Image (cartoon, rainbow, N blue to C red):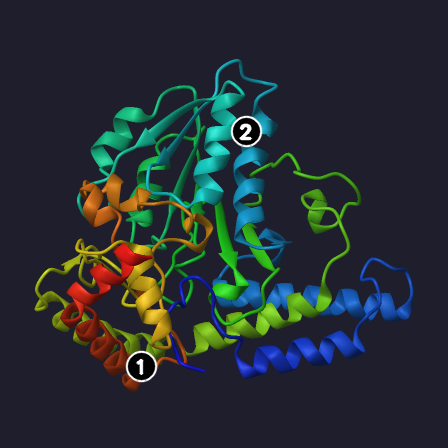
């Protein structure tokens, strides 16, 4: 199987999650909107799952909207707010940091093309928002701020509670948080947050299912039109097996939060220490507690990211450089926004840990990294030939 160190891109399913997915797929196949006993049973499973997830997250059941994943949740949150307000307001203004995931940033760019005013908020050298600058950007026309709770490339944690406190002073501004990389990696308080995105496959769940937590007093214009499923916010037949499996993933992740973080923190500190002593490497992730322990991002400017990834892949180690959704880019937009030069931004590597990561995986990664550095001249020659 090799060594898998790309948990920020996607995670293997927990055994309980996979078993639930298989069992429910075979037993509960009726449409949960159908008005017969089997339909009622399917709907009961959906609503029980909604209640369990709500309990684990500390929100109300009717705050949860099931979606196909974080990308849809982010699109629904952003376009839902803007399209719901635009008829009643002549000028709209929305704010987004430059380091956001493409499923947020590209929606903002689309809104900008449609005439919405967008402010792109810079970050400091750690990738953290400047609170004073944020305050100066808010105007009477501002209706939305989107922030990634944990950055998917560097692991830096944004001060969302502090931001929520600031935004509470501006009742017309909706605060949307992309939490796809936060669940199971850092403690979360939803106080002051209007919209929060979660993805199942980032926490040991299946792909194709996620959710959007929406405060009761927030109204969204739907992305799609059809039935009145998900409180009228998201039409279409609900995928009962995926919802049931997602519920198991939430339970497993939160129940094992302390133990998993303790294990992963030890891996992070050891790897951070080893990389920091290697000549020619530059660590881009801020240290704990400014970032989650699950991600370490570093650069090796002697080589480009694709060359580094290919070397590790040939040695049976799976890592990545950027977000999987931005993997075709030549350099990291996130690192560039943090003030890193082009060579650093074009040679970044992301190592991310998870439930199945073992100490032997970390040691094998370090051994391969040392081999890479020791064979630099050969690698340069091979890539010139190619």
Task: Indicate whether 79 appears above or below 127.
Answer: above
Task: Indicate whether 126 appears above or below 349.
Answer: above
Q: Position of residue 108 (x, y in %)?
A: 46, 32
Q: Which of marks 1 and 2 is nearer the N terminus?
A: 2
- Left or right: 87 in relation to 281: right
Secondary structure under the numbered disc 1 in the rendered image: helix
Is residue 179 visible to us here?
Answer: yes
The disc label shown at residue 374, or none: none
Q: Which residue lies furthest to the bottom in this view?
A: 360
Q: Position of residue 144 (x, y in %)?
A: 45, 32
What residue sits right under mark 2 in the picture? 82
Query: Which is nearer the eye, 298 or 60?
Result: 298
Tell me the crowding category of disc 2: few under 14, some 14 to 19, or many 20 or more residues within 10 angstroms, Cα based.
Answer: many
Query: Residue at 33% of width from left, 76% of height from top?
Result: 315
What residue sits right under mark 1 in the picture? 361
Q: Where is residue 10 in the image (x, y as percent from the top left)?
A: 47, 65
Image quadrant occupied by the C terminus: bottom left
Query: Residue at 57% of width from left, 82% of height from top?
Result: 16
Quadrant in which residue 216 is drawn: top right
- Left or right: 226 in relation to 295: right
- Left or right: 264 in relation to 270: right
Tell me the crowding category of disc 1: few under 14, some 14 to 19, or many 20 or more residues within 10 angstroms, Cα based.
Answer: some
Q: Position of residue 100 (x, y in %)?
A: 38, 43
């Amino acid at each position: 199987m090799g060594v898998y160190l790309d948990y920020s891109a996607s995670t293997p399913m927990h055994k309980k999650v996979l078993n639930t997915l298989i069992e429910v797929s075979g037993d509960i196949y009726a449409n949960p909107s159908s008005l017969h006993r089997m339909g009622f049973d399917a709907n009961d499973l959906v609503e029980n799952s909604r209640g369990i997830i709500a309990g684990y997250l500390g929100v109300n059941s009717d705050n949860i909207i099931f979606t196909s994943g974080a990308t849809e949740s982010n699109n629904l949150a952003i376009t839902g707010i803007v399209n719901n307000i635009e008829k009643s307001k002549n000028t709209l203004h929305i704010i987004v940091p430059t380091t956001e995931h493409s499923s947020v940033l590209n929606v903002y760019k689309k809104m900008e093309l449609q005439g919405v005013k967008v402010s792109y908020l810079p970050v400091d050298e750690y990738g953290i928002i400047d609170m004073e600058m944020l305050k100066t950007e808010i105007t009477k026309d501002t209706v939305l701020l989107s922030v990634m709770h944990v950055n998917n490339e560097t692991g830096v944690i944004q001060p969302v509670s502090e931001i929520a406190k600031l935004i509470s002073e501006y009742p017309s501004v909706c605060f949307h948080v992309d939490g796809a990389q936060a669940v199971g990696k850092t403690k979360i308080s939803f106080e002051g947050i209007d919209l929060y995105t979660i993805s199942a496959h980032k926490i040991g769940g299946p792909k194709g299912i996620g959710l959007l937590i929406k405060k009761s007093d927030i109204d969204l214009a739907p992305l799609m039109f059809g039935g009145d499923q998900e409180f009228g916010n998201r039409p279409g037949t609900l995928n009962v097996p995926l919802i049931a499996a997602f519920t198991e993933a939430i339970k497993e992740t939160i129940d094992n939060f302390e133990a998993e973080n303790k294990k992963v923190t030890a891996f992070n500190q050891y790897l951070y220490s080893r990389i920091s002593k290697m000549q020619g490497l530059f660590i881009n992730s801020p240290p704990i507690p400014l970032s989650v322990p699950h991600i370490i991002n570093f650069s090796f400017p002697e080589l480009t990211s694709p060359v580094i990834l290919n070397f590790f892949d040939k040695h049976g180690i799976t890592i990545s450089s950027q977000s999987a959704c931005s993997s075709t880019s030549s350099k990291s937009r996130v690192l560039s926004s943090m003030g890193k030069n082009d060579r650093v931004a074009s040679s970044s590597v992301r190592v991310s840990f998870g439930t199945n990561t073992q100490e032997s995986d970390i040691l094998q990664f370090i051994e391969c990294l040392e081999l890479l550095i020791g064979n630099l001249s050969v690698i340069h020659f091979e890539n010139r030939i190619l």
